[in-house]
Image: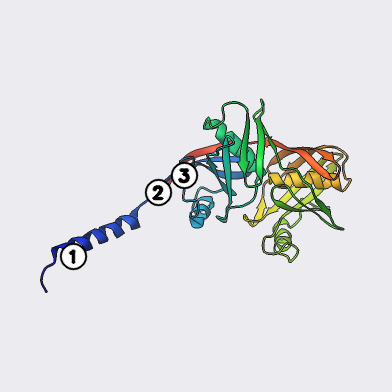
Amino acid sequence: MPFNARLTIFKLILIFAIFVSANTTMKITFTKYQGTGNDFVMIDNRQNNFPKDNIQLIEKLCDRRFGIGADGLILLENDTKTDFRMVYYNSDGNESSMCGNGGRCIVAFAKSLKAIEDNETDFIATDGLHHAAVLDNGMISLQMKDVEEVKIESDYVFLNTGSPHHVMLVDDLKNYDVKNIGAQIRYSDLYGKAGSNVNFVKQLGDNHFALRTYERGVEDETLSCGTGATAAAIAMHALGKTKSHHIQLDVEGGKLEVSFVKEGNNYTNVFLKGPATFVFEGDITW
């Protein structure tokens, strides 16, 4: 067979390209934040470099044994009408609905990046526009979406606070099997394929409640859930368990505050207040 120089060179180039592709690594710069124990991998994606459709990558980054470890991953992106856009992924790698603790954490992250210049900001998330303020004590107050419907059943309340939430009162909250019972409700026919977050609440005082939450997407109990705390506060008011419009909530990872205004059947001017704490930052090669 005669020697074909062009064909040989092409084959060598192809082999080299395959080798480079197989051995190409990606360096991802990240920052870790937590809000009352609900932790997030935060990535500045204003240059649109992050492979957003790579579910396996996001899942691996959130893995607590083989990755950075987090309940979710949040991208900070440019937006033409607000200071920034928040894109939230659960730890299973799928893009999800609004996250209240993550919303406070991305405000702190944006402040550190100088993406916001003062102590107030507007940003866009999957459930719409949010306003937030960085308070003098390091706490962050985040405006949540208005709640127009609270569905009250005999043994639970359902409402959407940016994410869907099933809320129920229990007596022995400390020893309650949150993971298994939460999973049963989350995967039940009641909520179908989409599922729901599930919150278990115990009243401690006139406007004081304890809360534990099973989160879909994480598929486990988390130390805190911001939209869940918001849902629990509104649900307790709707049930008549409190007359206060300012609710204190003890979650497994700390304390949160929820305030609101009741207008007819609607809950407006809903605010979630709590800490957003820097944990560490670094680079990971993938």
Residue 253 at what x, y percent from top left? 68, 43
Pick the residue in front: 55 or 202. 55
Mark 3 sits on what residue? Answer: 48
Q: CA distance from mark 3 to mark 1?
A: 38 Å
The first of marks 2 and 3 along the sequence is: 2
Q: Residue at x 11, y 68 (%)?
A: 3
Q: CA distance from mark 2 to mark 3?
A: 14 Å
Q: Is residue 44 above or below residue 53?
A: above
User: Could you say whether the residue bearing mark 3 is in a helix, strand or loop?
Assistant: loop
Mark 2 sits on what residue? Answer: 26
Mark 1 sits on what residue? Answer: 7
Q: Residue at x 28, y 57 (%)?
A: 17
The answer to whether residue 36 is visible is no
Pick the residue in front: 80 or 39. 80
The first of marks 3 and 1 along the sequence is: 1
Q: Is residue 130 left or right of residue 209?
A: left
Residue 250 at what x, y percent from top left? 75, 42
Badge 2 amino acid: Met
